[in-house]
Image (cartoon, helix red, strand yellow):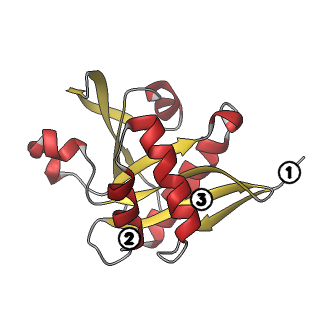
Amino acid sequence: MHQEKILQLQATDQGLIQQIAEWYLAEWEIPVERTTKRLETHPGNNDVLFQFLLLVGDKPAATGGLSNHVGLLEAYPHLQIYKPWVSLLYTTEDYRNQGLGRQLLERIEAESLKWGYEQLYLHTFTAESLYKRLGWKEIGQVDYKSHKTAVMTKQLNPT
């Protein structure tokens, strides 16, 4: 059994940024250049606040972070009143359904509290039931990229 480790991605982690960009292209058709630009200029670009990478042993298995901007906001500008957004939470196929996404989301929530954020947002068309089990509430639905997409929020509780 391999041990899981969550690292905070740095703007200088070129190889890992490229890996994440390739995942996002394959999963959501997000251009590699867009992802690399966002991650190579964080933090400080007023967009990506932080990004984590979950390793199983030494193998990248999942990623996700917190952002002020997500692609959904371009299609639905009225949602710009909400931020920050849990963004692009992704687990590789080999590691799905093993609790890694939940583990990473919990780390994002904990880090968000350290940054002073007590309410987060996300959108999903694939994992609504997972997020509901983890305490997220749906605040609306939109049609995004030909998918019925839930817009969700969670109030975090500082401990």
For marks 1 and 3 on the same chain, the one whose residue lies earlier in the sequence: 1
Question: Left or right: 83 with respect to 135?
Answer: left
Could you tell me which secondary element the residue under label 3 belongs to?
strand
Question: Left or right: 81 with respect to 83?
Answer: left
Q: Nearer the viewer, residue 113 or 95?
A: 95
Q: CA distance from mark 1 to mark 3?
A: 16 Å
Residue 136, position as x, y percentages in the image: 42, 38
Q: Nearer the viewer, residue 127 or 42?
A: 42
Task: State yes or no: discs 1 and 3 in contact (Cβ < 8 Å).
Answer: no
Q: Is residue 143 above or below residue 101?
A: above
Q: Which residue is mark 2?
A: 116
Residue at 10%, 45% (x, y): give it.
Answer: 77
Residue at 41%, 71% (x, y): give it.
Answer: 40
Q: Which residue is mark 1?
A: 2
Could you tell me which secondary element the residue under label 2 belongs to?
loop
Q: Which residue is mark 3?
A: 53
Mark 2: few/some/many CA within 10 Å (<14, 14-19, 20+): few
Residue at 44%, 26% (x, y): give it.
Answer: 126
Q: CA distance from mark 1 to mark 2?
A: 33 Å
Which disc number belongs to residue 76?
A: none
Farthest residue toward the right?
1
Question: Is residue 40 among the parts visible in the rendering?
Answer: yes
